[in-house]
Amino acid sequence: MRRLSRPFHKVIPSIKKKKKIGLPPGTLIYTGDKVQEKTKIKVTEYSEDHYNYQEFKDATTNLTKIEKPLIKWINIYGLAQVNIIEEIGHQFDLHPLVLEDILSPNQRPKLEDYGRYIFVVLKKLSWNQEEEDFEYEQISLILGENYVITFQERDTNLFNPIYERIQVPKGRVRQMGADYLFYVLIDIIIDNYFIVLEKVGDDIENIEDILIKNPDPETLQLIYKLKKSSIELRKSIWPIREVINKLQREQSNLIKDDLQIYLRDTYDHVFRISDLLENYRDIIFGMLDMYLSSVSNKMNDIMKVLTMISTIFIPLSFLGGFYGMNFIIYHSFQYDLFIIVIIMMTIIAAVMIVFFKRKKWI
């Protein structure tokens, strides 16, 4: 049997959140627990016939300088250096509440339109092979007229495929605008949910095998952990449907009409993911009933065996007790009577066993 992956851990808000109590709205304090030593800024500029990539460790460079028809993607890893995030917000004139949401990684997935830019918060789910556990991370995205800004809590390889696609001169990303890059980033985040649900499906299959063969109290704990995991997944997945639906309906100059077909495809992916998750949740809740039924059947089998043994020994006990009564018996007949009683007890036990087998009770 394959080893069960430890179900998706429940995220406990950082204790830093307490420091924000009573502070004015827009106060910038990073409340996450994924701390990267230094913030990294990866800047990619591209057009159909141009490509440039740079890395910065601070925001002293003017990142707002974008020459048309170039598209600029600013990818920021690490949010612990709040001064850098604040400087980037100052350069692009981001609302203080937006920066506050970026630095508070326990946000619910959402979309907000500020006119000059669109702000989206999503949850990235992934499988950690080393720790054999699910982990999640908040990713904030900002779409401007000719730029996209992404904020991640730490350096990951999630967006590596997109970097590779941008380097292809004749690729679709190079031919489209910033809104298409915005869509591609959202799409790759959502596609990772299929990998997560595949792990959940594997755990469900393994637990079902255990339930059929030999359920035990540890199996019940696995079911409850898996149930908690499905609840956490639902909290992250269901709001995304609202985000994508709102993107489709948003009357914004930042999203062109030709992007709608891609957004519909993304919405279809989200719908499939949420539908699959609901099916898994129904199966998980059904496994609780299956566990109780399996334990009950196992107990019935045990009681049946004990009942058969007791039933067989009832007449044998009667004969043994009757024979042991204090009768006056001639010594010459006592040995023959002992043999007769033993034979009668053996015949009665054999007849009862044959009878039980014909009735298919044993």
Image (spheres, grey):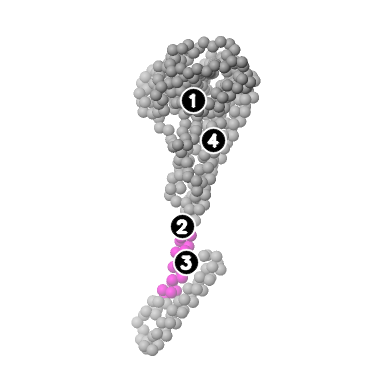
Given this view, does label 2 or label 4 mark the residue nearer the observer? 4
* Residue bounds of the magenta highlight: 301-318
Query: What residue appears at the point 46 percent right and 79 percent down from the top-left corner?
Result: 343
- The picture quadrant where one finds residue 253 is top right
Q: CA distance from mark 2 to mark 4?
A: 38 Å
**Picture mark count:** 4
Q: Position of residue 45 (x, y in %)?
A: 55, 16
Q: Amino acid at mark 3?
A: Met
Q: Residues within 10 Å of mark 1 (few under 14, many from 20)?
A: many
Label 4 secondary element? helix
Q: Earlier in the sequence, mark 3 or mark 4?
A: 4
Q: Residue at label 4?
A: 195
Query: What residue appears at the point 63 percent right and 21 percent down from the top-left corner?
Result: 170
* Up-down relation of residue 338 to residue 138 (above or below): below
**Pointer 4 with pointer 1, Cβ within 8 A:** no
Q: Residue at label 3?
A: 308
What label does residue 139 carry, if any?
1
Q: Position of residue 227 (x, y in %)?
A: 48, 40
Q: Earlier in the sequence, mark 4 or mark 1?
A: 1
Given this view, does label 3 or label 4 mark the residue nearer the observer? 4
**Pointer 3 with pointer 1, Cβ within 8 A:** no
* Up-down relation of residue 226 to residue 59 (above or below): below
Q: Earlier in the sequence, mark 2 or mark 4?
A: 4
Query: What residue appears at the point 60 percent right and 17 percent down from the top-left corner?
Result: 177
Is residue 265 visible in the rendered image? The answer is yes
Q: CA distance from mark 2 to mark 1?
A: 50 Å
Q: Position of residue 105 (x, y in %)?
A: 44, 26
Q: Position of residue 82 (x, y in %)?
A: 40, 19
What label does residue 299 carry, if any?
2
Q: CA distance from mark 2 to mark 3?
A: 14 Å
